[in-house]
Amino acid sequence: FRSPVMAGGLFAVNRKWFWELGGYDPGLEIWGGEQYEISFKVWMCGGGMYDVPCSRVGHIYRKYVPYKVPSGTSLARNLKRVAETWMDEFAEYIYQRRPEYRHLSTGDISAQKELRRHLKCKDFKWFMAAVAWDVPKYYPPVEPPPAAWGEIRNVAANLCVDSKHGATGTELRLDICVKDGSERTWSHEQLFTFGWREDIRPGEPLHTRKFCFDAISHSSPVTLYDCHGMKGNQHWSYRKDKTLFHPVSSSCIDCNPAEKKIFMNRCDPLSETQQWIFEHINMTVLEKFNSKASS
C-alpha cells in the first residue's frame, strides 16, 4: 500500500540508495521533521514508500533518552527547513496555520537545494497530485470555517459544558461558565469547536485537541473519545431549536442541572435542558450542514 509519509524510524531501505539520496538532512536538529524530509525526498526523487502488512521492522528504544527532546523553536525550525527545501509554494499553507514560523531561520539549505537539483527530483505539486492526492480531503491545506465555536451554554441550567482537559473516556459535565466568574484555572476547558467534519472538539477553531464528543446510545453519557473523522458516534447536528442532535442514535444531548451530568436522551425540543447556545455561530456553514443532513 502506497504511503505518502512514513515515520522516520520505522522503514527499511536499500543502504546504497539511502546514501545516494543524501541520507537525512544533517541540518535537522536532534529530533522531529525527519519523517517528512525522507518521505518527500524518496517520492520526489524516484522512489516509493509502501506499507507492507506482512513485513516486520523493529524500532528498538533505549532504556534512557541520550538527548533532550527539543522544546521552543527547535522542532518548528526543523519543520520549516523541510518545507523550504521540498514543499515549494505549498509551504505557504504552513505559514498560514503557523504564522510564527515565518520569522524562524532554517539555517543554510543551499546544499539540500543542490542535492534536489542534482537528483532531478520532481516538484511538490507533482507529489500532491500523484502521491498524496487524497490528503486534502481529510486534511485541507486551509482549515474550512467552523459552524460554531466558543462556550456551549445550557438554557435551563445557565451552566457550560466543561471537559476538564480530559482524555478518552472522560465524561462531559456542566460547570459554572468561566465568563460568569468561575475561577479561571487550568482545570476548566469550556471552549469547543463544531467544525467541518461535523464533530465537536475541545479548543478554538485553529487549535483543537484530537478528542471528540462521542455517544454510544440514546441514553449513554457524552464522553470524549479519540477523533476518527468517520462521523458515526462522533457526528452531530446543531438544529434551529438549539438541540444537539446525534443522528446515529436519533437522540439529543440532555443534562441534569442539579447533578451537572450530561447524557443522551430522546429528543424533546420543548425541554430547555436539551437546548444549548454556542457562543459564536457561522450561519452560512451551519445551514449548509443542516441542508445536507435533510437531503
Image: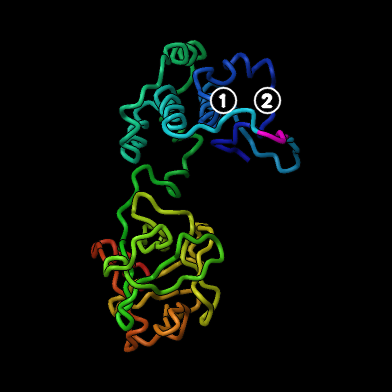
Q: Residue 4 location, x and y as percent?
A: 54, 36
Mark 2 is surrounded, within 10 Å at the Cα level, by few (under 14), some (14 to 19) or many (20 or more) other residues, namely: few
Residue nearer the viewer, 121 or 153: 153
Residue plotted at (42% across, 27% down): 77
How far is disc 2 from disc 1 in space, using C-alphas? Answer: 10 Å
Q: Are marks 2 and 1 in contact (CB under 8 Å)?
A: yes
User: In the figure, is residue 262 to the left or right of 291?
Assistant: right
The main secondary structure of the magenta stretch is: loop
User: In the figure, is residue 224 to the left or right of 59?
Assistant: left
Three-letter amino acid code of the residue under disc 2: Val
User: What are the residue bounds of the magenta stretch?
Assistant: 59-64
Asked if one can make out residue 280 in the rendered structure from this viewpoint, the answer is yes
Residue plotted at (64% across, 32% down): 65
Q: Which residue is mark 2?
A: 13
Q: Residue 37 location, x and y as percent?
A: 51, 27
Q: Quadrant of residue 13?
A: top right
Q: Residue 27 location, x and y as percent?
A: 49, 18
Indicate whether 66 appears above or below 198. above
Residue nearer the viewer, 109 or 49: 109
User: In the figure, is residue 136 to the left or right of 217?
Assistant: left
Residue plotted at (59% across, 18% down): 23
Residue plotted at (32% across, 83% down): 156
Q: Which residue is mark 1?
A: 42
Three-letter amino acid code of the residue under disc 1: Val
